[in-house]
């Protein structure tokens, strides 16, 4: 049997939102169930994360901002910028999801593991050091990367962000951190209106489809891995570049998303780089359709893992 792909999930990834809210909160639980239904995972394959600690959050966020959010004292304008109504459940959900990406990194770095692990949430790349934005409160990518560096687990991190929206918060947090290289491939005419320069930005015009997108990625990624020589890749596999995404404006198909994820994971595997994956953004009225789109990452990861490894140790 191949080594089981480590997956990370917690029931607290889902918390109630007002009826009609456009953030697709139910997708996280549906994704977990879908992976089991498709035979990609069994219930015992999921690792349940702990909440991110205060110390871990402060590696990427201002203490005053952390306090304001946790206590429900952000203020109306700050809450409006985030786009999610404050609740104790949202606080719990947010800190748990950050803990999930921290755990995903730990699993990817385990010496006896597969060198690959996938969260079933994460990718809150619009959260800045001292404010949230675009449904993002704390930046799980930044916290997990900073935590791995602080604990001496890694020396150089590449954050590869293929969400359709530019990773402005991640870029801002690591603007002066040479040990983290941020790369964002995104639609140039999309949120956020004010981009924060990443170490490498690849803005794409609207309506780019599978062929052009994959050609750009095929030129970018080998150079990026050779140039940065990371000992950890954090991969944001947002599915909002899909042609049917409500907030996207690119034109990738299901097959294009799968080829994108397969290529990224196989490239990292070929270089021997541990890779921790998060699902990123995705928006569709049918949450089951959306969850299946997010499962593209886990299908590709399962296929890459199955090819890369032989029988598990007895």
Image (cartoon, rainbow, N blue to C red):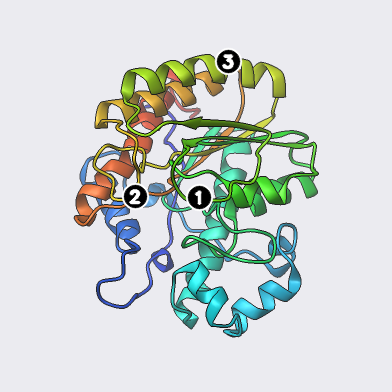
The residue wearing badge 3 is 222
Q: Is residue 133 above or below residue 260?
A: below
First in sequence: mark 1 or mark 3?
A: 1
Looking at the image, do the residues carrying marks 2 and 1 touch, with CB atoms under 8 Å apart? Answer: no
Left or right, residue 251 beside residue 119: left
SS category of the residue bearing label 3: helix
Instruction: Examine the rendered structure and indicate whether residue 23 appears above or below residue 8.
Output: below
Location of the N terminus by quadrant is top left
Q: Is residue 37 above or below residue 159?
A: below
Where is residue 193 shown, x and y percent of the image? Answer: 52, 51
**On residue 305, which mark appears?**
none
Say which residue appears at 28% left-offset and 42% top-offset: 293
**Residue, disc 1:** 123
At 35% from the left and 63% from the top, the residue drawn is: 23
Of callouts 2 and 1, the N-terminal one: 1
Q: Nearer the viewer, residue 67 or 3?
A: 67
Residue contact at pointers 1 and 3, CB within 8 angstroms: no
Q: In this orientation, does residue 306 appear?
A: no
Q: CA distance from mark 2 to mark 1?
A: 16 Å
Quadrant position of residue 2 = top left
Of badges 3 and 2, nearer the viewer stands 2
Q: Position of residue 116 (x, y in %)?
A: 52, 33
Q: Along the horizontal axis of the image, is 192 left or right of 12?
A: right
Residue 118 falls left or right of residue 197: left
Q: Nearer the viewer, residue 191 or 66?
A: 191
Determine the CA span between mark 3 and mark 2. Answer: 29 Å
- State the residue in front, 101 or 80: 80
Give the mark, 3 or 2, whose residue is nearer the N terminus.
Answer: 3
- Of the numbered discs in the image, which one, if any, rests on residue 247? 2
> Crowding at label 1, few (<14), some or many (≥20) Cα neighbours within 10 Å?
many
């Amino acid at each position: 049997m191949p080594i089981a792909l480590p997956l990370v999930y917690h029931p607290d990834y889902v918390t109630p939102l007002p009826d009609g809210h456009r953030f697709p909160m139910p997708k996280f639980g549906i994704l977990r169930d879908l992976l089991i239904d498709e035979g990609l995972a069994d219930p015992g394959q999921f690792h349940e994360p702990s909440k991110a600690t205060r110390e871990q959050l402060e590696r990427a966020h201002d203490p005053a901002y952390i306090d304001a959010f946790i206590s429900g004292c952000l203020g109306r304008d700050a809450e409006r910028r985030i786009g999610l109504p404050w609740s104790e459940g949202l606080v719990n959900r947010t800190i748990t999801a950050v803990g999930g990406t921290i755990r995903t990194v730990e699993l990817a770095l385990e010496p006896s593991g597969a060198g690959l692990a996938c969260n079933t949430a994460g990718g809150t790349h619009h959260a800045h050091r001292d404010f949230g934005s675009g449904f993002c409160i704390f930046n799980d990518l930044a916290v997990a990367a900073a935590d791995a560096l602080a604990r001496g687990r890694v020396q150089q991190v590449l954050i590869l962000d293929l969400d359709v929206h530019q990773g402005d918060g991640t870029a801002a947090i690591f603007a002066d951190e040479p040990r983290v290289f941020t790369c964002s491939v995104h639609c140039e005419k999309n949120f956020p209106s004010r981009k924060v320069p990443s170490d490498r930005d690849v803005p794409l015009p609207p309506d780019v489809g599978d062929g052009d997108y994959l050609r750009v990625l095929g030129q970018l990624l080998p150079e990026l891995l050779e140039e940065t020589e990371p000992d950890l890749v954090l991969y944001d596999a947002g599915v909002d570049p899909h042609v049917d995404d409500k907030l996207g404006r690119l034109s990738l198909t299901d097959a294009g998303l799968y080829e994108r994820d397969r290529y990224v994971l196989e490239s990292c595997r070929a270089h021997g780089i541990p890779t921790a994956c998060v699902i990123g953004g995705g928006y569709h009225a049918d949450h089951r359709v959306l969850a299946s789109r997010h499962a593209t990452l886990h299908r590709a990861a399962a296929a890459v893992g199955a090819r890369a490894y032989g029988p598990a140790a007895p």
